[in-house]
Image (spheres, helix red, strand yellow):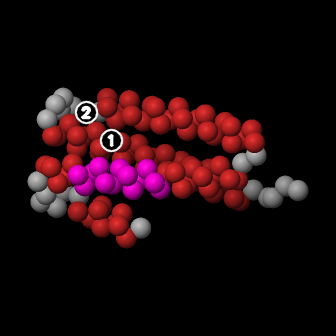
């Protein structure tokens, strides 16, 4: 995750608006990949019904994330709107990663059923 750390360290470090937009978009890709990995780890720990439920939940969450990120944009139009959207998108994604990690932790701590 050195790439992620490098990108995060550059946030707000005297970059031009276009560079900030590009940086936050790249961070969105990294966070989305991290979300997918954690999602798949949890998915693998579930039975068929749990997998079905998690899949449906994730699909709904993905649609909701885009709408929530869009709703947080204050600057309608212009390059600042992109930065605001990306920031909200990243914050929502990080919250979901933390939520899924917590569920994975709880699932991993449960005794294995035979």
Question: Circles 1 and 2: CB distance less than 8 Å?
Answer: yes
Residue range corresponding to the magenta coloring: 22-34
Disc number for residue 88? 1
Give the structural element (helix, strand or loop) at label 1.
Answer: helix
Q: In this view, does 107 lie above or below 67?
A: below
Residue that numbered label 2 is attached to: 73
Q: Callout 2: helix, strand or loop?
A: loop
Give residue 77's mark: none
Q: Position of residue 53 (x, y in %)?
A: 66, 36
Using the image, determine if residue 71 lies above or below residue 100: above
* Residue 84 visible in image: yes
The C terminus appears in which quarter of the rendering? bottom right
Where residue 33 appears, as percent x and y from the top left, is: 46, 54
Number of marks in the rendered image:
2
Quadrant of res 70? top left
* Residue 24 belongs to magenta span: yes
Task: Residue 28: give x, y in percent of width and height.
Answer: 35, 50
* Viewer-nearest residue: 48 or 109: 48
Residue 30: quadrant of the picture: bottom left
């Amino acid at each position: 995750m050195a790439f992620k750390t490098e990108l995060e360290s550059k946030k707000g470090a005297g970059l031009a608006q276009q560079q900030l937009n590009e940086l936050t978009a790249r961070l969105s890709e990294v966070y989305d990949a991290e979300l997918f990995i954690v999602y798949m780890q949890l998915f693998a720990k579930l039975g068929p019904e749990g997998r079905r439920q998690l899949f449906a939940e994730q699909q709904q969450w993905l649609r909701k994330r885009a709408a929530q990120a869009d709703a947080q944009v204050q600057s309608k139009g212009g390059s600042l709107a992109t930065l605001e959207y990306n920031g909200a998108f990243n914050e929502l994604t990080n919250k979901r990663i933390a939520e899924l990690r917590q569920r994975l932790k709880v699932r991993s701590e449960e005794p294995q059923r035979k």
